[in-house]
Image (cartoon, rainbow, N blue to C red):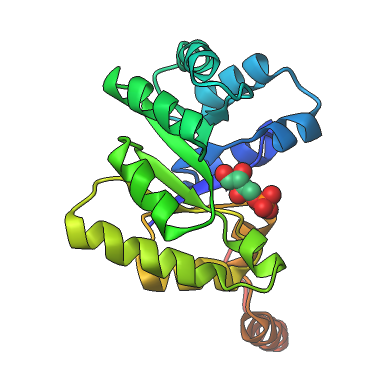
Amino acid sequence: MKFFVDTAEIAEIAELNDLGMVDGVTTNPSLIMKSGRDILEVTREICDLVSGPVSAEVVATEAEAMIAEGRKLAAIAENIAVKVPLTWDGLKACKVLSDEGRMVNVTLCFSANQALIAAKAGARFISPFIGRLDDINLDGMDLIRDIRVIYDNYGFETEVLAASIRSVNHVLESARIGADVITAPPAVIRKLADHPLTDQGLAQFLKDAAQARITIL
Ligand code: E4P
């Protein structure tokens, strides 16, 4: 399973990248706003750091303008994945940009039918939003499950990029279902290493090491 990091914070990306945890990066206009940076500048810096796909999102709503923005974003670096929303115009833009050989990430996916039509339009990635479905009392994991089945039924090559991940359980369930990629905030990725029994066990080992005066260096 590939790990994308869902942030535009350079320092956080660099830290996780040094650990080999970053197979790609996803950004969106809200994350860019949070970073306080210019979209083109910060996206270029991210692409300099990370060799995997870096999603940068268009802000136009009409296909022609989305295509123009997508081309400009894609010119930043070879590893840009142009992110377009799952609207009819977004699908038109997806088809044109994909036919030009660019990676397209279709975002804001909330139904399996949306995922099906994005795959038909040539999306390289589909981003179903788990947490935002959970927020309205639906089960975001059901959506990941349905998309996995549908894509496997027909051999679609579009990668299932589980997004809007808010917890380590979202990561675990996505892995069980077979999502190709998860994109998660750095804090969630760090939490994957946590277990209270690890902390407890380590405390005991250190206590015993001190009592036995164990030294290695
Ligand atoms: C995905 O590409 C989005 O940037 C992100 O996962 C959205 O997450 P949120 O619902 O927590 O804002």
Q: How many marks?
A: 0
Q: Locate residue 178: give its quadrant.
A: bottom left
Residue situated in front as seen by the camera: 82 or 217: 82
Quadrant containing the N terminus in the rendered view: bottom left
Residue 47 rendering spot, x and y as whole percentages? 51, 24
Q: Can residue 115 be seen in this view?
A: yes
Q: Farthest residue in the front direction?
A: 88
Compared across the picture, whether 46 is left or right of 147 comes to: right
Residue located 60% across and 25% down the image: 61
Residue 108 in the image: above or below residue 148 = above
Residue located 50% across and 70% down the image: 141
Residue 53 in the image: above or below residue 59 = below
Compared across the picture, whether 127 is left or right of 6 comes to: left
Residue situated in front as seen by the camera: 59 or 77: 59
Residue 59 rendering spot, x and y as whole percentages? 64, 24
Residue 33 rendering spot, x and y as whole percentages? 78, 30
Residue 102 rendering spot, x and y as whole percentages? 35, 23
Q: Locate residue 153: give its quadrant.
A: bottom left
Residue 55 in the image: above or below residue 160 = above
Q: Is residue 185 visible?
A: no
Q: Locate residue 120: give its quadrant.
A: top left
Residue located 61% across and 72% down the image: 138
Quadrant containing the C terminus in the rendered view: bottom right
Residue located 63% across and 72% down the image: 194
Compared across the picture, whether 175 is left or right of 21 comes to: left
